[in-house]
Amino acid sequence: MPAPLRLQGIPASAGYAEGPLFDIDRPPAAYAGKASSEEERTSLQAAIGKAVSRLVAMVEASDSDAAGILEFHIAMLEDDALSGPAFAAINSGLPADLAWRQALDAEIAGYTASEQDYFRARATDLLDIRDQVLRALTDDGGGAAPIGAILYGEDIAPTRFLETDWSAGGGIALKAGSAASHVAMLARSRGVPMVVGLVDPPAAPAGIALLDAEHGSIVLAPSATETGSFREALSAFAGRQVNARTFLAQPAKTRAGTAVRVQVNIAYPDDVDGIDIATCDGVGLMRTEFLFGKTLPDEETQYRAYRKVLEWAGAKPVTIRTVDAGGDKPVPGFTVEEGNPFLGLRGIRLSLTRLDIFRVQIRALLRAAVHGNLKVMFPMIAMAEEYARAAALFAEEQAGLVARGVAQLMPPLGIMVEVPSVAIAPEAFAGVAFLSIGSNDLTQYVMAAARDNAAVTHLNSVLHPAVLRLIGSVAVFGREHGIAVSLCGDAGGDPASIPALIEAGLRDLSVAPAQLAMAKAAISEVPV
C-alpha cells in the first residue's frame, strides 16, 4: 500500500471532498481516417457543428455565468479564422484530427507564449475548444467521471466542469489552474471544492483522495488516521454552513452590534430569479458587459434588463455598472486588441471613445431609473475628468429624453475605486455620489500580480497591508465627506477577509449570492 502523500495548493473554492481520483488529462480516443480529403473536410465540418450544437444545448441549460463562457466558445468555433488553417491542412493531405490539432496547437502556443496574462488565460479556452472537436471527431464523450470523484489534472475546461454531475459531491484538484479562472468562479457559485497550483504533484495518481479546499491541500492514499481527521474537519465545515444559513434572513451585524449592509453581485437579469430580496440589502454590482454578447444590445434590450432587476429590488438600491468591456472581457465590435489589455482601453476609457455605444446605454439607464432605486457607477476611473465627461453625457441624454417627453430619472452617479490613483488621492472625487471599491482589480494593480496567474496568486491578496491601507483611507475619506463607500470584489464574500475589511472601516459589502449566508455569519463574529 503506498504511503500517504499530502500536496499543498491554493484554495479556489472552499469545501471538502472525499472520493476516487479521476484523470482528466487522458488522451482522446483514436480517430479513424477517411478515404479522401473531401471526406476529411466533411468529417471536420460535422465535428465542429456537433461541438457547437452541444454547446448551444448546454447554454440553454446553464445559468448566466456559465452561458457567457459557453457563448464565447461558440463564437470561436464559428469563426472561420480559427478553422481555416485546419481545412487548408486537410487540402494538403492531413487527416481531419491531425489538421485540427495542428492548427489549434499553433494558436494555443501563441497565446501561451504571450507576455500578457489575459492571452495566457485564453489558452485554456482554446484547449477546451480543440478537445471538444477532437471528441466529436471520434465520438468520444471524454469518459464520464464516477459520481463523487475528484477531478485531477493540469487544468480543467469549463465544459468539463459543466458536464460533470456535482449533485453527489466531488471536487477539483489541479496542478496548474487559477483561483480567478472561469472554472473557479463556477465552482464557487455551485459550492464545488477546488484547489489549484498543487506543489510537486505526481503525474497520474489513483485511488481515494481527501481534498481540503478550505485550506488548500489534498492527501493521496490517506491512512485511516488521516481519513478520520479529514471527516471531522468536513463535519465542522458542514456545521458552519448550516449555522450560516440561520443568518441569511437577518440583517448583518457584528458581535458589538455594528450594522453592515450586505448586497449581492449579479451579471444577468435572470440572476435575481433565485434570490429572495429579503435576504440582502440590494444589488451592489450589476455587471452589464455580459449583455454585450455576439451583437451589441440595443436601447430597448438594455432598458428591459435593467427594469427587471429594479422592479425585483423594489425600494432597495440597485447599483448598475456601465459596461466594463476590455481586459479579460472582450466584446466583438466594441473592444480592441491590445498588447496589455488590463492597462489599456477598457471600462470608462473605452466607453468615452465609443460614444455611439455609450449613449445607448445611458438612455436605457435613465429610462429604467423610474422603476426603482437605481445608482450608476463608472468602471476604471483614474482621473476626475473621466467622471466629469461621463456625468455630462448623462445630463445631455437626459435633456434629450425630456425634450421628447420620455419618462426618465437621473440616478446618483458614482465610481469604482480600482485604479490606485483614485485610492491614493480620492480628494479629486469629492463630488461623486458614492464610491465602490473593486478589490480584485485594486489588489492586482497595487501588487503588480495578475489575478488570473496562478504563479503569483500568493502576492494577489487583499489582506496585504498596502491594499488594506488604501481601502481604509478610502473609507475614512468617505466618512469625512459624507460619501457612501462599499466594496464589491471577491474579498467581500471571503470569510477570511471580512474581519479585516470591517476593521478597515467598511460597512457595506457586496457578494456573490451563494456567499450571502457565510458572509453574514462571518460578520457576526467580528468584534468591532
Image (spheres, rainbow, N blue to C red):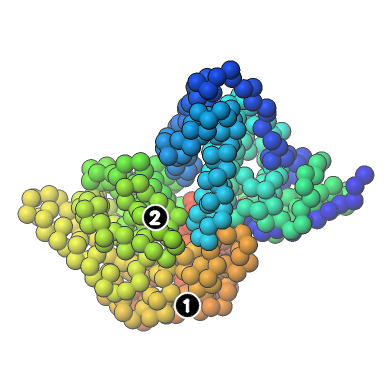
Q: Residue 49: x and y, percent? A: 47, 27
Using residue 191 as the reference point, say whether residue 438 is left or right of it: left
Using residue 388 as the reference point, say whether residue 21 is left or right of it: right
Label of residue 470 in the image: 1
- Residue name at image x 53 percent, y 30 percent: 92
Ranked by sequence position, the earlier of labels 2 and 1 is: 2
Q: Residue 482: x and y, percent? A: 33, 77
Q: Residue 442: x and y, percent? A: 47, 69
- Residue name at image x 63 percent, y 38 percent: 166
Task: Please identify the quadrant where the C terminus is shown.
Answer: bottom right
Element at label 2: loop
- Which quarter of the figure has residue 274? top left
Q: Is residue 392 above or below residue 210?
A: below
> Which label sits in the foreground, 2 or 1?
2
CA–CA distance in space, label 2 to label 1 = 31 Å
Tell me which amino acid carries mark 1: Leu
Q: Residue 490: x and y, percent? A: 51, 60
Which residue was labeled with disc 2? 337
Tell me which amino acid carries mark 2: Glu
- Residue name at image x 28 percent, y 44 percent: 297
- Residue name at image x 80 percent, y 44 percent: 205
Q: Please say whether residue 422 is visible from this viewpoint.
A: yes
- Mark 2: few/some/many CA within 10 Å (<14, 14-19, 20+): few
- Mark 1: few/some/many CA within 10 Å (<14, 14-19, 20+): many
The residue closer to the viewer here, 111 or 331, is: 111
Q: Is residue 395 above or below residue 17?
A: below
